[in-house]
Image (cartoon, coloured by chain):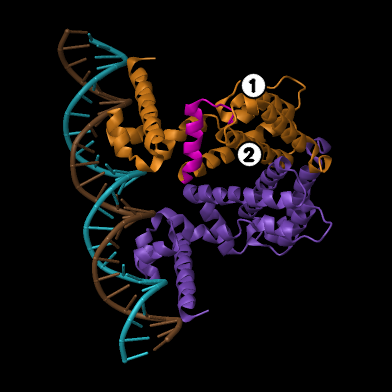
Chain colours: A purple, B orange, C cyan, D brown
Amino acid sequence: MGLRELKKERTRETIAETAIRLFLAKGFDQVSVTEVAATAEVSRRTLFTYFPTKEDLVLQRFADHESEAARIVRARPAGQDPLEALRDALLAALEQRDPNTGLNDTPETRAFFQLILDTESLAARLTRYASRGIDALAEALREAGADPLTARLTAAQVLAVQQELTFMNHACLMDGSSADDRYREAVGAAERAFDLLRRGAAAGW
Amino acid sequence: MGLRELKKERTRETIAETAIRLFLAKGFDQVSVTEVAATAEVSRRTLFTYFPTKEDLVLQRFADHESEAARIVRARPAGQDPLEALRDALLAALEQRDPNTGLNDTPETRAFFQLILDTESLAARLTRYASRGIDALAEALREAGADPLTARLTAAQVLAVQQELTFMNHACLMDGSSADDRYREAVGAAERAFDLLRRGAAAGW
DNA sequence: TGCGTTCATGCACTCAGTCTACTTTGAGCG
DNA sequence: CGCTCAAAGTAGACTGAGTGCATGAACGCA
């Protein structure tokens, strides 16, 4: 990687970091793109070559995880069921307090989540990234042997449920629980969720 | 209802109708709010008192259906399972070629759907409305006796799956099928979807 | 060292959405 | 009726996001 690539990467990082810092401090709508650009010491125009919209300053990191679920399914051990692989990956992420699970209670992560939930345009775009992941996951499930219909339906269900679990974890943390307090419940909820996916609502009521 | 209310309602209708007509003819991004206002013969400012954003000119009708699923659960016959009620409602909607099922092949409805799917900002906002419905449906499921966790998870699953079914139906219609051609498959897909919800993925693979 | 390509910049522009101050008009009442 | 008030509409300026274009700076390579 040449010096050129390096500087680009660094500029990109600086811009996103600066933006998030300002947004956390003052609120997404209270900070203009012009202010972000000035603080990051680039021109407005440059900022927009790196990030197509203001929302992407915050969310582009999620875009990279768009097809995470599909990746997990493809990388599963031979013979393992896709749903099992997804469940295990989620449990592992919970154990590591992966921010994406909503179970990370460092002040920055909590504030970051809250920023997104408090800002309509950010929440909307995040939901959007999630639903793009459906296509990728459905494709992976087809490769795993599911018929196209089941693949799509299951993909939609899995991602919806994962997002919901994340929200619930975050909500608990914002209610005052520590991540460690919440951990057992979060694991229980995740297991219940995959139980629902595997065995259906009939099994639980 | 006084003359005042009447005129308000009429103005609202005129604006939305005009907007959609223009958007269908030229594309969402090719029509400015100013043009819509001028064509509808109101001021820009008036338009924005009726519709908070440009997207709402197209989508506000969906906002009203936000808690449709919750309503169906609450209105179900005594003793009937909520999932059954939702399935029956979906089957009935398919039979009536309800536009919300994606199974309506009048040129206007098809074009309308396509407009939304083709326009990133519209698609994003629509997804957003759908996920707002989760809260309402979860509440209704709790009233029906589900524990809070199961209620939320199930609500998320049901709405995700319904949206997916709608997309699939619309995609088939855009591929050239007539609504009647697609009807049987659509019913099958819906039944399969609720089967997945009720009995889980394990039952089908 | 020089040359072409890629990247950054400044500036002007369009368009969404808001604010303020002003005019119109339906509703209610004597 | 006509008066009056509040609700509704209007005009126009303003902020801020995002784009197009022409120009300048910096890297990579010979």
Residue at 63% in and 48% down: A134
Among the 4 quarters of the image, the one containing residue A72: bottom right
Instruction: For residue B30, say whether it is visible.
Output: yes
Between A79 and A30, the one nearer to me in the picture: A79
Q: How many marks?
A: 2
Give the x, y percent position of residue B14: 36, 25
Q: Is residue B124 magenta?
A: no
| Residue type marked 2 | Glu
Between B156 and A21, the one nearer to me in the picture: B156
Among the 4 quarters of the image, the one containing residue A176: bottom right
Give the x, y percent position of residue A58: 50, 59
| Residue type marked 1 | Glu
The residue indicated by pointer 1 is B95
Between A51 and B190, the one nearer to me in the picture: B190
Which stretch is magenta?
B102-120
The label shown at residue B164 is 2
Parent chain of label 2: B
Please give left or right for residue D25 compared with residue B155 in the image.
left
Give the x, y percent position of residue B166: 61, 34
Between C18 and C5, the one nearer to me in the picture: C5
Q: Where is B78 relative to B124, above or below? A: above
